[in-house]
Image (cartoon, grey):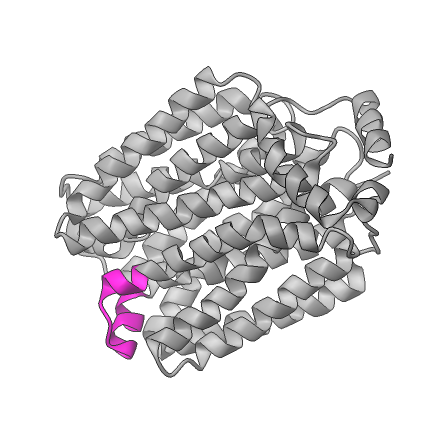
Amino acid sequence: MRLNRPALVVLGTSTFCYVTAETLPVGLLPQISAGLDVTEAQVGLLLTSYAVVAAVSTIPLTALTMRLPRHSLLAATVAVFVVSQAAAALAPTFLVLVLSRLVCALAHGVFWSVIGPITARLAPPGQVGRATSLVFIGNSLAIVLGVPLGTALGQWLGWRLSIGLMAVAGAVCLVALLLLLPPMQPLPRDREAALGNRLRDAVLILRNGRVTGLCVITVVLVVGHFAAYTYIAPLVRRDAGLDGAALSALLLGYGAVGLIGNFVVGRFVDRRPGPFVIGLTAAAAGSMVLLAPVLGPAATIAAVLVWGGAFNAIPVFLGSAALRVAPAARDAASAVYVVAFQIGIGSGAFVGERFVSAGRLGTLPVLGAGFVLLACVLVACWRGVFPARISSEEHHRTEAAALH
């Protein structure tokens, strides 16, 4: 069996759309604020409300859809994405914009819950990490190209056009998924299980200590990151005087080094993930602390680039770990991991909004770095959360267990 590269590319492109759309308000805070007559802090809460709905709905919706063909379910989540982005682009009020994003959030959790197991089924034994890293290139490209280009277009032609283009990109992905993703029926065990049992399994998976550890580390890490990243636009405006095209260029650089980092560490996802996560989190925390004082353009740009290179390489390790810590229950493990990630995003954005509203913007990098450093310590202490790839023999055993 070989890697199904065309299908993996389609999956990666779909992640590009979802990640870009979710985080695009970060780069368009001033434009959306002015266009809909709300404060920048309120616009920042778009990420919180989105994350809360995704976190609350992921496990029940994943359980409800367990019997559906995997390829059809993934295509349905992208179709919901297209409709919601079109509605957001045409939103006449801030409330309508919020509601359209919440519709997308309902599909978001299911999308991320199934994409990991689908990726694993497209990969040969021992190459799940490699396949995951290929798909997560879409995640990195969203930060490299999606948010910076969306920000630039929003500043030039209006934020509505940027969001509208996401609807168009999603429609292209939908067609490609229908054409290239092979049929994937649910596993017999999932198809035959009652709804109550599926919900129970999704919750009881947390009795697996490694799954719990992964979720705790994810929440702590993502809270720290998004507390500061949600307000990166006002931060670099304060520290380096960057705005407009200069801000777009910095976001482009932030994502570009993240893409390079993703590519460089991708080969180690299947071998020594734990030490790399420790190193990356430590680098991210150190660079975030440097953003607390006003150091001027050069130091601010350097710190932001290191932050981007370190943090954007981490999700591929988290996503791969979710598939490895519970190889016989990948859908359930992926679902609770997605919930943990969304709790982190929503909590981080909310904490950031509270600090910004209180006039304490400069405190956010230190606060965020503290959380990221705590995550680094947890990775070092919580053994087994980031295992290396499973062997071919173990892969076959877990697949056989899933079939019965």
Whether 177 is drawn above or below 62: the answer is below
Question: Observer-nearest residue: 185 or 276?
Answer: 185
Is 329 part of what is drawn in magenta?
no
How many labels sit on residues? 0
Please tell me whether the stretch drawn in magenta is mainly helix, strand or loop. helix
Whether 124 is drawn above or below 259: the answer is above
Q: Position of residue 272 (x, y in %)?
A: 58, 21
Question: Observer-nearest residue: 171 or 84?
Answer: 84
What residue is rendered at 36% in x and 41% in y? 223
In this rendering, does residue 4 appear at all?
yes
Compared across the picture, whether 227 is left or right of 59 comes to left
Compared across the picture, whether 22 is left or right of 365 comes to right
The residue range painted magenta reads: 29-44
What residue is rendered at 41% in x and 80% in y? 91
What residue is rendered at 76% in x and 54% in y? 70
Question: For the N terminus, which image quadrant?
Answer: top right
What residue is rendered at 68% in x and 65% in y? 76
Q: Position of residue 112 (x, y in %)?
A: 60, 50
Question: For the C terminus, which image quadrant?
Answer: top right
Q: Position of residue 204 (x, y in %)?
A: 62, 33
Query: Quadrant location of residue 233?
Result: bottom left
Residue lying at the far front of the rendered structure: 196
Q: Position of residue 87 (x, y in %)?
A: 49, 78
In this rendering, does residue 386 appear at all?
no
Question: Observer-nearest residue: 197 or 32?
Answer: 197
Whether 193 is drawn above or below 17: the answer is above
